[in-house]
Image: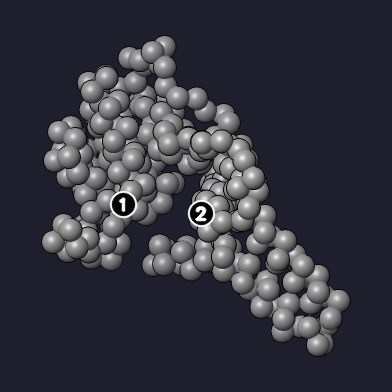
Amino acid sequence: MEWAITNFIAAFLLPPLNLLLLLGIGLLLLRRRPKIARALLVAGFGLLWLLSTPIVIDSGLHWLESGFEPLTQADADQAQAIVVLGGSLYFHAPEYDGADTVNAVTLQRLSYGARLHRETGLPVLTTGGAVHDHLPEGVLMAQRMQTDFQVPVRWAEGRAINTYENARYSAAMLERAGIRRVYLVTHAWHMPRSVMAFRNAGLEVIPAPMAFTTRYRNDVFAFVPSAAALRDAYILTHELIGLLWYRIRLLVS
């Protein structure tokens, strides 16, 4: 139920639905409140333009990632385990005989987690919960890690439905194993919220960010609106709202 409520609210706060609502309200008010309507239409059009412009969204993602650097040799041998966060699933995959598996975002994280395991030899924890009656994401991540990357997974957490719970349930599993210091593997843009949640759960976190926002080069197309940029705007907006919500949640808890 919490998963459904959270995603329902998020749909109204995130692009493109928030922009469509803004423009729709502007159109409805065009006759009765023309000044307000024009302001809403201009705001909606302007935000749509900004949120679909690559240079704008890339700058926002760079800001999220700016506090983190890739792991270096100096970071080696500082942790006791590797935690890989899930990034959602690929449901009913035809090429896997209709079975559920991990999506591309999660697969990127598993790939880097496998590399980190080979470099350090540390045990791996995968974390991600279940949607309805499907297998938990953490379990499916463990299966892919072991079959595709030949990396054993010691713990597969399968209850969490968000990053906050990823941290809470993972910390409980690791605490029972006497582990307090971990490498945390997730996308660089997801790292600020993840580090906040895992440190609040009592773990010592060494960020292991991956998949930084990069560009072949900045040219005229960086200023031309695109569907890809609008997709990334969803990620940027989601993370900014999530950071604000986590700060509020941690203050009141």
In which quadrant of the rendered view does residue 20 lie? bottom right
Name the quarter where the N terminus is drawn: bottom left
- The first of marks 1 and 2 along the sequence is 1
| In the displayed structure image, the side of residue 153 where residue 29 appears, left or right | right
Residue 127 drawn above or below residue 185: below
Residue projecting furthest to the right: 35
Which one is nearer the viewer's eye here, 154 or 225? 225
Q: Residue at x 17, y 45 (%)?
A: 143
Where residue 188 appears, as percent x and y from the top left, is 47, 36
State the residue at coordinates (56%, 49%): 236
Q: Residue at x 73, y 77 (%)?
A: 26
Q: Position of residue 208 (x, y in %)?
A: 41, 28
Can residue 244 be spotted in the picture? no
Secondary structure beneath disc 1? loop
Q: Nearer the viewer, residue 166 or 42?
A: 42
**Residue under circle 2?**
228
In the picture shown, does residue 43 fall above or below 167?
Answer: below
User: What is the three-letter code of the residue carrying label 1?
Assistant: Asn
Q: In this image, 243 relative to 86: left or right? A: right
Task: Using residue 111 as the reference point, say whether residue 65 is left or right of it.
Answer: right
Three-letter amino acid code of the residue under disc 2: Ala
